Image: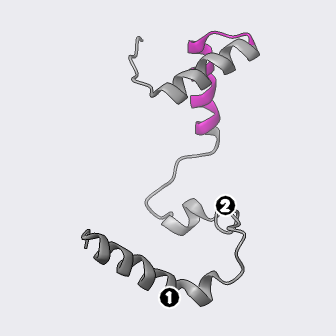
Amino acid sequence: MTLSVRLDDDTKRLLLRLARVRRISQSELVRRAIHALAKEGFPDEETTLYDRIKHVIGKVHSGRSDLSQQTGEDFRQILLEKKRAGRL
């Protein structure tokens, strides 16, 4: 089967680089990627959104320790700035 796929520039660069480094064709790389995703399994209708993303929750650190304490004030400042700029 022949398949045409549109790739953005970053994805195209990744595909080319990975194929070159692994010394396989682009088609073989795509086949392997599909098989790797299939091994992860297929989400069923019973799977919740939380179950699908729980592996990434809490993995990013902002560098700030006061986010939950300052959220309301930060949001207020953003809205004020937008209002002053005429974008609200």
**Mark 2, secondary structure of its residue:** loop
The dominant secondary structure in magenta is: helix
Q: Magenta stretch containing residue 35, yes or no?
A: yes
Amino acid under disc 1 = Glu
Identity of the residue drawn at 62% across and 19% down: 29
Q: Nearer the viewer, residue 81 or 17?
A: 81
Toward which corner of the image does residue 16 lie, by quadrant?
A: top right
The magenta segment is: 23-38
Provide the residue designation for mark 2.
55
Q: Position of residue 18 (x, y in %)?
A: 68, 21
**Mark 1, secondary structure of its residue:** helix
Report the side of 34 relative to 24 (left or right). Answer: left
Identity of the residue drawn at 51% across and 63% down: 47
Q: Magenta stretch containing residue 83, yes or no?
A: no
Toward which corner of the image does residue 60 lie, by quadrant?
A: bottom right
Is residue 14 visible in the rendered image? The answer is yes
- In space, the residues marked 2 and 1 are separated at their CA atoms by 30 Å
Q: Nearer the viewer, residue 9 or 80?
A: 80
Circle 1 crowding by C-alpha within 10 Å: few under 14, some 14–19, many from 20: few
Q: Nearer the viewer, residue 16 or 68?
A: 68
Toward which corner of the image does residue 36 lie, by quadrant?
A: top right
Report the side of 4 relative to 39 (left or right). Answer: left
Provide the residue designation for mark 1.
73
